[in-house]
Image (cartoon, rainbow, N blue to C red):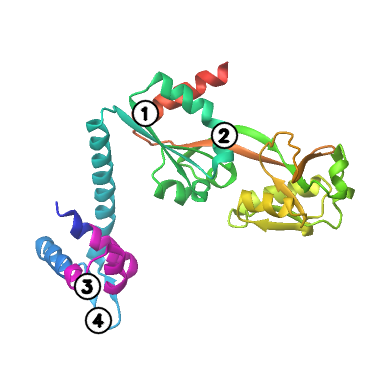
Amino acid sequence: MDTKSFKYFISLARHQSFTKAAKECSVTQTAMSIHISKLEEELKFKLFSRNSRNVVLTKAGANFLAYAKRMMDEYEQVVAESYNISLGYDGRLLVGASNFPDAIYIIDLLKAFHKKYPDILVETVTETEVNEPDGFRELELDVAVCLPYELQTDPDIEVIPLVRRPLRFVVNAEHPLAGKQKLSPNDLQGEKLFVLQLTRFRNTSERVRQEWLMSGIDTSQLVEISDFDDILILASSGIGVGVLPYYLPDIRNSRFVVLDLEGTAPYADLALAYRRDSQNPSLRLFLEVFREMRKE
């Protein structure tokens, strides 16, 4: 199989432009054109309709594209598996998380799994896309710790509740609120509240907004920030109050103080998700370890 031709075909189908596809594949337009022409000659049908403006898949090409993607995915998976076998591993497990603070909740699980199955290679991916069905698939994850509300709408993905984390509030050590034992909603009136950006996750965003309202906090105070570290920097600088969806320990230092909210604080859920139709035996073993640990 000429994998280059398949790779070029898939790229050209995506971009509908020889210029963009050639750039993505780091080849000349001439080289790409030759590969596509040879592939069409071998298949005995046209993959694209070409004109001076663009390149469009033919009906036959669109049908072939699904097969080409599937074959390339399988080819890359077999190559990866074979490479791991050459290194002495019996299997591979790809684990996803949005960030390290979320991954904390499965570190003990990964440790137990590795101890029981040391010959299975465990690899990790940290990407925000793990929280979305399409991203989960595109990253080719076996399992992920993630926000549950987007993934649980997909019938092909199993979502298991993992942990409910109360939100905590971070203020500069010299902030007037820093000396309080706990915060009330009234204490936060007029403060900018820096929260993680969730707008792209529609179900999660709506659920979190409801939690804020139930806690008596005005949602117009929320300012969405894309990164955990940026929230800590802004809060430590006294620009506003940081709100983090993971359970920070009680920390007091020269920069910031971490406080809880009186009553019922907003919370953020985490779940464990995996593909129901996965054929990876390493995933089955991983889930067995997970269930054993939950019984303890």
3D distance between C-alphas at marks 3 and 2: 46 Å
3D distance between C-alphas at marks 1 and 3: 41 Å
3D distance between C-alphas at marks 4 and 2: 53 Å
- Mark 3 = which residue? 29
- Mark 1 = which residue? 282
For marks 1 and 3, give the one nearer the viewer: 3
Query: What secondary structure is marked by label 2?
Result: helix
Image-based side of 133 in relation to 41, left or right: right
| Residue 171 position within the rendered picture, expressed as x and y whole percent measured from the top left | 78, 47
Kindly identify the residue that appears in the image at 57 percent across and 32 percent down.
105
Corner quadrant of residue 25:
bottom left
3D distance between C-alphas at marks 2 and 1: 21 Å
| Residue 276 position within the rendered picture, expressed as x and y whole percent measured from the top left | 43, 36
Image-based side of 203 in relation to 77, left or right: right
Q: Amino acid at mark 2?
A: Ile
Q: Earlier in the sequence, mark 4 or mark 2?
A: 4
